[in-house]
Image (cartoon, grey):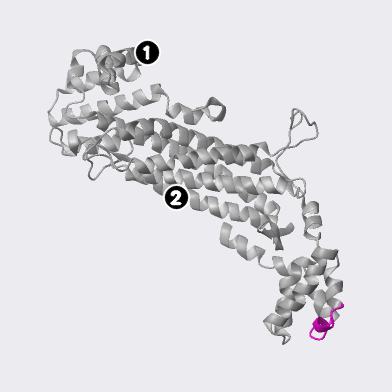
Amino acid sequence: MIPRYSRPEMAAIWSPESKFRIWFEIEAHAADAQAELGVIPKAAAEKTWTAKDMAFDIDRIDEIEREVKHDVIAFLTHLAELVGDEARFVHQGMTSSDVLDTCFNVQLVKAADILLEDMDKLLAAIKKRAYEHKDDVCIGRSHGIHAEPVTFGLKLAQMYAEMERNRTRLVSAREEIATCAISGAVGTFANIDPSVEEHVAKAMGLSAEPISTQVIPRDRHAMFFSVLGVIASSVERISVEVRHLQRTEVLEAEEYFSPGQKGSSAMPHKRNPILTENMTGLARMVRSYALPAMENVALWHERDISHSSVERMIGPDATVTLDFALVRLTGVIDKLLVYPDRMMKNLNQFKGLIHSQRVLLALTQAGASREDSYRMVQRNAMKVWEEGADFLAELKGDADVTAKLSDAEIEALFDLGYHTKHVDTIFARVFG
């Protein structure tokens, strides 16, 4: 985790203190269940809970681990120092992965909850701005070239619908990752009753893994991190749109430029889209974490630890980075500077050329073949591109066109309202 791109709420989930606290809760809840079964004395389970309000000594755990070369054993040794002799009953019938995997899933669930909150705020910001600019007409572009009119509100509505789909995906991924395994070595429950797993799962807000090996199946994690990658890709799509709209030659919208902000160390005039550029880079990183998560699925037999080092990195980094990007994107959308007058100026840049399809369709309706209609419209359109001509004037001066359409009929085809007549219908579909 890089502090520059970390928010404290998300980073705290991955702190050593948080991890060891979750480990403790798993062990203590398991001890309760074992005590109910009569496997360990109830007094031992009760004594284990006395460590609940104690501060774990991270340096001491690290010191023990340097000797024993095993993080869970180091933690259990330190727990025994805090609890006393009764700690010998802790971890009965369990294996390290029971603690590690269950903890990792608890952390991912907590992270997902923060990400869902982030997405709710982002969706609210996009919706607000979409309605604000619902009827502001701008040019739609395909291949980066002027196509036909849209509205800026529709651009934002597209972003909303995409992020709403992503939220649904994350809810599903959260549910899929929220499992607990307390099944012992190779997952057979040979030394621990399945009811212990069910007890711990309920206590930790998880569900019991239907069948594990010595680890929770990693296809769950592959799906989780893949969803994070998809969300990051949507963050990038929105960011790239803003970056294109902020280009000097376009300048239909731009990131908020705060008082005192500097755009360049060399050129005082610069106002650069640094936030959306930053989010493009962050999205690349989040996507990159999905591949190793998928590669973690293929472990040897009942387990190996090839996944362990990967997850110690991608768990914090993917969630922290996406959290930061989502919050940053919300700020960009909320403060985005939008220029409807510039949109209209750009839309009219090629003197009516954007109405070519309406003319084409009208000619076919008037009896011309599609091929002839296309040739008539295109030869006049090329004069606009190459000579700067006025499209409407050229059409009116084309005898083949006027043989099919009157001047009044041609002029009627240049109505912008034709292109925006279904905006309300689309908004109703998106926003309900």
Q: Quadrant of the C terminus?
A: bottom right
Answer with the quarter of the image where residue 19 lies: top left
Q: Is residue 89 visible?
A: yes
Q: Residue at x 78, y 74 (%)?
A: 379
In the depicted view, which residue is nearer to us: 294 or 362? 294
Query: Which residue is at a point 29% across and 32% down the rendered structure image?
Result: 305
N-terminal of the two: label 1 or label 2? 1
In 3D space, how far apart are the residues under numbered discs 1 and 2 (Cα atoms)?
A: 39 Å
| Residue bearing the label numbered 1 | 59
- Give the amino acid at mark 1: Asp
Disc 1 residue crowd, few under 14, some 14–19, many 20+, Cα 10 Å: few
- Is 182 placed left or right of 134 in the picture? left
Q: Mark 1: which secondary structure?
A: helix
Q: Residue at x 61, y 55 (%)?
A: 157
* Mark linked to residue 169: 2
Residue type, label 2: Arg
Residue 102 visible to an observer of this rendering: no
Residue 414 location, quadrant = bottom right
Q: Is residue 414 magenta?
A: no
Task: Determine whether, in the image, residue 334 is placed left or right of residue 314.
Answer: right
Horizontal side, residue 203 vs residue 406: left or right: left
Q: Position of residue 171 (x, y in %)?
A: 43, 47
